[in-house]
Amino acid sequence: MFSQISSIISAIPTTLITGFLGVGKTTAILQLLANKPKNENWAVLVNEFGEIGIDSALLAANPSEKSVFIREVPGGCMCCASGLPMQVALNQLITKAKPDRLIIEPTGLGHPKEVVEVLTKGKFQQVISLQSIFCLVDARNLIDKRYTEHPSFIQQLNVADTILAAKADTYSAQDEENLSSFISQNKLADKPLHLMYQGKIDPAWLTKRPKDIIASNTTIGVATPSSQESSHQIEVIAKKASEQKQALQTKLSNEGFIERHNHGEGYFSKGWIFSDKYIFNYKQLFDLITSLTVSRAKGVVLTEQGSYTFNKTGCEFSCNQVSKVKTSRVELIDRDEKVLNNITSIQLLMLTKDNP
């Protein structure tokens, strides 16, 4: 039976962190978690475009206290189908964690307005207190119409109550001028703008949210099923998700790796999970990753030199050693499916050796 949220849990301070692909949302969350009050339980709900679940693995791979709970909704926008996938994940996360603060990271290609709708109406209206909605923007991308004219990017900016200029330490004077012009031309000057350095979000920004944000940004017309119908659908989705997870785990145990695909909003994803029987060659793997021309590449991997997370957006590449991870996960995202098809499971397996 699907567990209902206790009536004792109410008004959980919640922050929504939006932003387009590769802008640094997960890095920002890691910085927040590293500086959270030690006496508080925090929960993080991560939604990803890809099917593999990289961001939750990145968060879990970094050293943190037991008072941080992470739940993922992979495979596209979690607010689709009347927000039922999101409701399932939120119910499970809140019931388990009973958090003092909740952070939600929608996919960079999702629909944040509908996420806000789920959080501020219906069954979560009394449980969630949505205190801040951030949109992370990389000023260096504001000359690229693939970003600025993408519906998801536009909606992220409109929904946000605060704009955060991510990776500000990399900006040139021209980037800063482009940011200022973009804010002015798109009539966003009424929203607070902060520069972010090394992914750091000032904790004081978490609660600075205009009181009228719900009224101004949630007139969306999402179909809402009846209470009885919704409860039944949620139970069905929860059961199906559990069965799919078990099936994937069985396949991973039997075959040693899983390959998954997704597409939508003009993008394609291709990802893999490799069991711990495979250990990647550090140099060969990262030589391959850095040579790719995909929009986004990210992952957590086991190598002969230890466990690492990596992130590639455009020409930027970062790699950090972390505590040992249970499985290796690699995800590629691009507008051109043919580019992704150039990388195969066999090609990646050739970069590994069996773990003794």
Image (tube, rainbow, N blue to C red):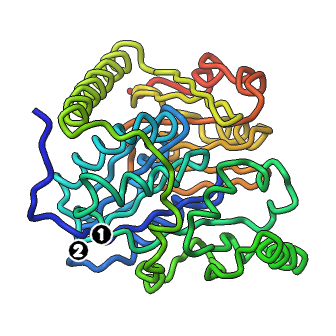
Task: Work out which quarter of the rendered image holds the N terminus and state it.
Answer: top left
Q: Secondary structure at mark 1?
A: strand
Q: Residues within 10 Å of mark 2 (few under 14, many from 20)?
A: few
Q: Residues within 10 Å of mark 1 (few under 14, many from 20)?
A: many
Front residue of 343 and 42: 42
- Number of marks in the rendered image: 2
The residues tagged by marks 2 and 1 sit, at their Cα atoms, a distance apart of 8 Å
Tag of residue 321: none
Residue marked by disc 1: 101
Q: Is residue 201 left or right of residue 193?
A: left
Give how far across and how far down residue 237 sits, in percent: 29, 29
- Mark 2 touching mark 1, by CB under 8 A? yes
Amino acid found under the numbered disc labelled 2: Glu
Q: Is residue 293 visible?
A: yes
Q: Quadrant of residue 231?
A: top left
Residue marked by disc 2: 40
Front residue of 102 and 355: 102
Amino acid found under the numbered disc labelled 1: Arg
Q: Residue at x 46, y 79 (%)?
A: 209
Residue positioned most to the bottom: 204
Q: Residue at x 22, y 46 (%)?
A: 92
Q: Residue at x 12, y 42 (%)?
A: 3
Q: Secondary structure at mark 2?
A: loop
